[in-house]
Amino acid sequence: MPASRLRDWLLLGPGLLWLALFLVIPCAIVFCFSFFERGVYGGIDYIFTFENFQRAIDPLYLSIFLKSAKIAGTATLVALFLAYPAAYAISKAPPNRQTALLVLAMLPFWSNYLIRTYAWIVLLNREGLINTGLRDLGWIAEPLPLLYNEFAIITGLVYNYLPFVILAVYSSISRLNPEILEASEDLGAPSWKTFLRVTLPLTMPGVAAGSVFIFVLSIGNFITPDLLGGGNLLMVGNIIYDQFLTARDWPFGATLSFILIGIMMALLFTQAILVRRAQGDAPEKEEANA
Amino acid sequence: MSDQDRTVIRIEGVSKRFGPVTAVDSIDLDLRENEFFALLGPSGCGKTTLLRMIAGFADPSEGRILLDGQDMTPIRPNRRPINLMFQSYALFPHMTVAKNIAYGLEMENLDKADLNRRVDEILEKTELSAMRNRKPDRLSGGQRQRVALARALVKKPRVLLLDEPLGALDKKLREQMQLELKRMQHEFSITFVIVTHDQEEALVMADRIAVLKDGRVAQIGAPRDLYENPADRFVAGFIGKMNFFPGTVAGTGVSFAGQSVLTGDIPTGLSGEAVAAVRPERIKLSVEQPAGDMNAMPGTISEVAYHGQDVNLHVTVDGCDDPVLVRVPATDADETVWHHGGKVWCSWNPAHTRILAA
């Protein structure tokens, strides 16, 4: 083996080992479990069956998958509408201020996920800051139903993953060659046309990356629906959680997990293809300066 | 006044300041109908800033820019009948060649048939028809440059601005494109304004050149004027090669190194420190001291560089730190005498001496 090959393997080795031990093998185990029967007192009976998959496509579970996708999709859309303008503004700020603004966007991550989610309960509940504030202003008589519904779940998901979406979109916008935007204006385009026909298409890789990121994390999330949904609005993550820890039906939990992993993989794969197709269309900033 | 001399763009006392830095310092210029004009200067001379002000991407701090007599200051770049070919070409990477070219016309709301006809026409003229469905990343540097040119020309602007258009190309392609740009300018009868730091490029292409230094115009003129009659030492040194002999104004010329007087026309009002300047191809080499009223000095050959058609010789002379550069046609080069260490006389006709302020 040539020295450079050896070096490559040594550098890749620890990471690959980690992924194999804690990602690939667990996924394989989940995959295998989904074909066995549940034990009478929990655990697994190693008897081959397709029954779990038949159960998973039951309209009951199918509707939960669909609802989860709807909630994750809504969170994705809301996050994009919030993140794109923010990322755009950051990329237009003076270069020395951009880092500071990005750090500000990431600031919520410095506190714990659970604490941040509980903070939303404080804000959104019937006697929370928003409801009492609006009531004191005299704008509402009765408290608004802000907590323990889809609105609360989506708010929590958007809040938690927004910084990632901002980062993904920002990296795309900041790589645009400014001369390309000037060229559009020079050729007669007003700024809104430049945005629709040049800026937006060229930043789609960032939009796609950010979307997949928040969608994948949202659809499998179980803490936020549990806390902000009040436990009566179930998403796939909650069902899986229940199957493993409450119903003690590991094979069925494994089946649902496996289907969820499949959906996520399909999305990541689609995004990778999109990015590769756009790669030829990557901004040619570096080359132009060469 | 012929159509050729009509002013298209008038630049009136235009300055541009970035904080404490004055990039462009009260420039006055008239750009004429259908001429190939070059803004030439070293980096940081303000030429690109001036070009960007003409395009509308920067506003003058002072002065104004007129197009056909109309003040352009309040008019946004997308409303000016002026197009800019960017240094990076700035092609839209997600659009094909044909879409790139059609983009500017789509903004004019032309009807579809007219638009397609104009795109086809320009594709043909720039020999890009075969590439029409390719995206920019599948094109060579020269092809991208032609797309950028076609995209700007298809708009039929009053003025086409070109920012270092050939900078990214290799030498051979650059020479080819110089002639092609010239041909395009004739064919389209549009005023071209090119920004370049390459004096040779400016000499080959331009009808007139403005040499810029530190945000000011050092000299404006036809290439031959600038080469033969540089206004000052900077222009003399920037355009082509030049030998400078420092000294003081005395009698009929410049007394050089206390020994000889280099004869030439002394500009009125010049006295004291001065330089006598002469082009390398004007200097003749001989073994014997030349007779007659020639400017002459003895020296020793320190370097011989063969360039194919020419031979460049460095001659070390007393009183001059830099060796004198002499360029002779290779067919005249006498290798038995003109070799390293050979003793020679450098001489030239006083009429070819330029005397300039030091």
Image (cartoon, coloured by chain):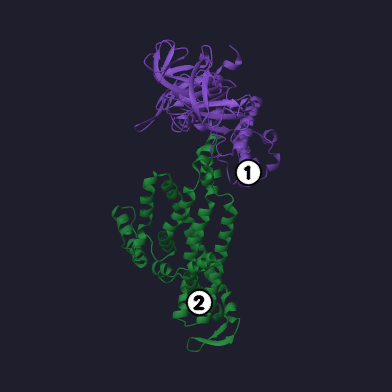
Chain colours: A green, B purple
Co-location on one chain, circles 1 and 2: no
Amino acid marked by disc 1:
Ser
Above or below: residue A6 compared with residue B330: below
Q: Residues within 10 Å of mark 2 (few under 14, many from 20)?
A: few
Tell me how far mark 1 sits from mark 2, CA to CA.
49 Å
Above or below: residue A114 compared with residue B323: below
Residue A225 seen by the camera: yes
The residue at 37%/60% (across/down) is: A144
Which residue is disc 1 drawn over?
B140
Kind of element beneath mark 1: loop
The quadrant the N terminus of chain B occupies is top right
* A247 to the left or right of B166: left
The residue at 59%/81% (across/down) is: A51
Q: Position of residue A54 (x, y in %)?
A: 60, 78
Of the residues tagged 1 and 2, which is closer to the observer?
A: 1
Q: Residues within 10 Å of mark 1 (few under 14, many from 20)?
A: few
Kind of element beneath mark 2: helix
* A43 to the left or right of A115: right
The quadrant the C terminus of chain B occupies is top left
Which residue is disc 2 drawn over?
A26
